[in-house]
């Protein structure tokens, strides 16, 4: 697909906040402030001159006069003269002149004066300005995704706006005269809509803004109009159904006719997923998925996702999980297989239980957590072997 | 905590759709319809009587008269008489009388009649009504979380509404006079707000509705009023800062005074996290986190999460990931340690790189993906050993 660039979506500067988590960074983000922004105490205690307390030991107590107190959120009231101490809280500003902080536990507070019982290591209780992050340091790179933890780091370093890719608008067109919506009458010959829900939720979990359209009737002119509208209104189009080479084979024709470079892949040697179509119209990706719900989901995750992530200028960085196979996989070596598995907690690490079966499609769909890719030409994989399971997209971490 | 029950939030019946993904199921969900809802063909071809084609072979072609065609989304136009065939698409209704479907590839279509070149296996091209899911079958149990895949399965089985726990409202109270918001002037002695962002985004990623309040000044009466309001308006309260036994030690007092059973845990023997408070007021959980951003996030994930998930009647089912430690961990055996790690792709499976350091707090926060728990009394863990890493909560799967 490299030869046919996909246009990245617009960049926006978003005020930093919890809702930035999950969004894709569009440009390098630099620290705008030192962290910590000033040299401060890392303990509750007394700011001192290190030389004044160096010799303090339980048998050789050093007594210093207290000159005031540092308040949280303010600078020190004055510089610290030799032979004196200033009360300072954890995180408090280190007064000018001070070079150490003696922990509360190592002193006796007499009110006007303090007796230092142990001065050892007191110069370690300081965090210098910029010790954690230096202003100008690169904190985030384009193509990375903001996490709950990193949005805190960025805010901590003075970043108040983030350059984020706008949420890409991905159209979902579900075709099929036989499909009826939840709650509607299930007339003879009809089946319930599955793909609007499972593919729609998956697109959201992948970080896209889902644009759902009315279900598309199996008529060439109807599909043509719906596809043209979706392509006009969205950054990418995902089509479910109508991609097989069969009775209703006009989908690839219409996509091809919509503009260059057109259909790039039609049919993949993987199971499930054979009747899958990948196209680019202008600079917008079009993913034609099989109507079969398991095939559609598997192809969206494996072939569709890396293409759609180009809308964010991103590579797919989903981490494969190491898991122990709970039953033997002996598959037709003439095809690549993508085996849906349910993950569960093992004594250590994870178990992956293959969900196979021709008629139990729903159980595959409902209980799958991840996919195990078995390349073409592979021999059987025995129960107990470790495999890489690539997790399916999820809307949140909640399990 | 078992002795002090936490009230689960209200249950609502939500129309099924992509936005149900990530929500917690509140009651058993049964299949309302058979899947498939009628016996249907699993291939494009001709519906036949199995007995008529059993002997058909390339050298012994069987010729049948075509009587009509099944349309997708409709029942068959008539019953199928012996010696006849009816065109049927993949997913089409199997006409009454038919007991097999011959694949298109195994016939020659003559228009009025069809020549069956191979009848072998044609009785396998049928999916019987209810073969996948039977009406009445249990499809989801309370405490499970709807996934993109399972929401499709549930819709497929005729479920049009789901019994879901309402999103629990979790208050986030961030305390600290020294903290300033993104974009505000960083006056002397001030530090940037981190916890509102990292804890807020984490609570959302855990499946909660985040209720953010104004930052709370370090004054007993101010905190008391803010806490009372949060407790009244929300299902749980998370407090950041003020939980250590120090100058500003009124937080535990105020929480304890708010109602029985009160503070249950104050101080945990884990690093980071020591000044953490767990309380229940009435039947609402209260989590007091340290002000230090790394400690706060780690404690929210490890101690807070299992408690907050009780709002959904759920146990924490986060799956630990097996990963290869990239550097040696030699830690104080007198404490339990929760070591933030960055995960990356290894040749097979995952690498876990420990993020340690006293002053590089921000780097820990910004680049952590998971936590490795090292129990009290553990010896060093060598580089190359496999460890269980529990992933931090994320808003979406996007990486």
Image (cartoon, coloured by chain):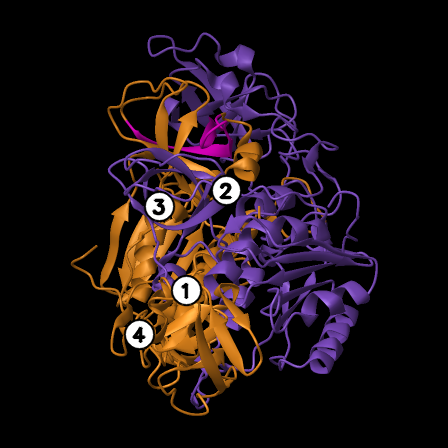
Chain colours: A purple, B orange
| Marks 4 & 1, CB-CB < 8 Å contact | no
Task: Give the spatial CA distance, label 3 vs label 4.
Answer: 52 Å
Query: Secondary structure beneath disc 2?
Result: helix
Q: Does A65 sit above or below residue A1?
A: above
- Label the magenta part by its dominant secondary structure: strand
Q: Nearer the viewer, mark 1 or mark 3?
A: 1
Query: Secondary structure beneath disc 3?
Result: loop
Q: Where is residue A377 in the image (x, y as percent from the top left)?
A: 47, 35
Q: Does A95 sit above or below residue A204?
A: above
**Residue at mark 1:** B60
Query: Secondary structure beneath disc 1?
Result: loop
- Tell me, yes or no, whether dots 1 and 2 are on the same chain: yes
Res. A352 image quadrant: top left
**Residue at mark 4:** B51
Asked if residue A122 is among those painted magenta in the image, a careful observer would answer no
Q: Position of residue B279 (x, y in %)?
A: 29, 56
| Marks 1 & 3, CB-CB < 8 Å contact | no
Chain identifier of the residue bearing label 3 in the image = B
Chain identifier of the residue bearing label 2 in the image = B
Query: Is disc 1 surrounded by few (<14), some (14 to 19) or many (20+) residues within 10 Å?
Result: few
Chain identifier of the residue bearing label 4 in the image = B
| Marks 3 & 2, CB-CB < 8 Å contact | no
Task: Give the spatial CA distance, label 1 vs label 3.
Answer: 58 Å
| Marks 2 & 4, CB-CB < 8 Å contact | no
Query: Is disc 3 surrounded by few (<14), some (14 to 19) or many (20+) residues within 10 Å?
Result: some
Q: Pick whichever, B127 or B365, lies toward us.
A: B127
User: Which stretch did the figure color magenta?
Assistant: B335-356
Q: Which of marks 3 and 2 is nearer the N terminus?
A: 2
């Amino acid at each position: 697909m490299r030869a046919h660039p996909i246009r990245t979506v617009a960049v926006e500067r978003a005020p930093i906040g919890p809702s930035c988590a999950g969004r894709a960074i569009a440009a390098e983000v630099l620290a705008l402030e030192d962290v910590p922004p000033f040299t401060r105490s890392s303990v509750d205690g007394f700011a001192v001159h290190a030389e004044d307390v160096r010799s303090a030991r339980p048998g050789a107590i050093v007594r210093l006069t207290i000159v005031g107190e540092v308040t949280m959120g303010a600078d020190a009231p004055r510089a610290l003269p030799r032979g004196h101490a200033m009360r300072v809280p954890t995180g408090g500003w280190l007064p000018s002149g001070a070079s150490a902080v003696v922990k509360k536990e190592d002193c006796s507070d007499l009110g006007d004066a303090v007796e230092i019982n142990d001065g050892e290591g007191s110069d370690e209780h300081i965090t210098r300005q910029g010790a954690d992050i230096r202003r100008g340091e690169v904190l985030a790179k384009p193509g990375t995704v903001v996490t709950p933890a990193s949005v805190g780091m960025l805010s901590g370093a003075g970043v108040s706006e983030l350059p984020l890719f706008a949420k890409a608008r991905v159209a979902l067109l579900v075709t099929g005269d036989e499909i009826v919506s939840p709650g509607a009458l299930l007339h003879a010959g009809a089946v319930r809509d599955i793909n609007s829900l499972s593919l729609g939720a998956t697109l959201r979990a992948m970080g896209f803004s889902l644009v759902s359209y009315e279900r598309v009737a199996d008529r060439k002119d109807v599909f043509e109009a719906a596809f043209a509208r979706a392509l006009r209104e969205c950054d990418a189009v995902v089509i479910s159904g109508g991609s097989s080479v069969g009775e209703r084979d006009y989908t690839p024709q219409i996509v091809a006719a919509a503009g260059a470079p057109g259909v790039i892949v039609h049919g993949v040697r993987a199971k499930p997923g054979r009747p899958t179509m990948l196209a680019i119209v202008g600079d917008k990706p079009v993913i034609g998925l099989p109507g079969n719900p398991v095939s559609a989901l598997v192809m969206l995750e494996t072939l569709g996702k890396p293409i759609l992530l180009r809308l964010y200028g991103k590579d797919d960085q989903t981490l494969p999980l190491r898991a122990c196979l709970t039953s033997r996989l002996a598959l037709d070596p003439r095809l690549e297989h993508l085996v849906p598995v349910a993950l569960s907690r093992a004594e250590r690490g994870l178990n992956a239980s293959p969900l196979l079966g021709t008629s139990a499609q729903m159980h595959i769909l409902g209980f799958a957590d991840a996919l195990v890719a078995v390349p073409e030409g592979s021999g059987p994989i025995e129960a107990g072997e470790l495999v890489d399971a690539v997790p399916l997209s999820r809307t949140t971490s909640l399990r």
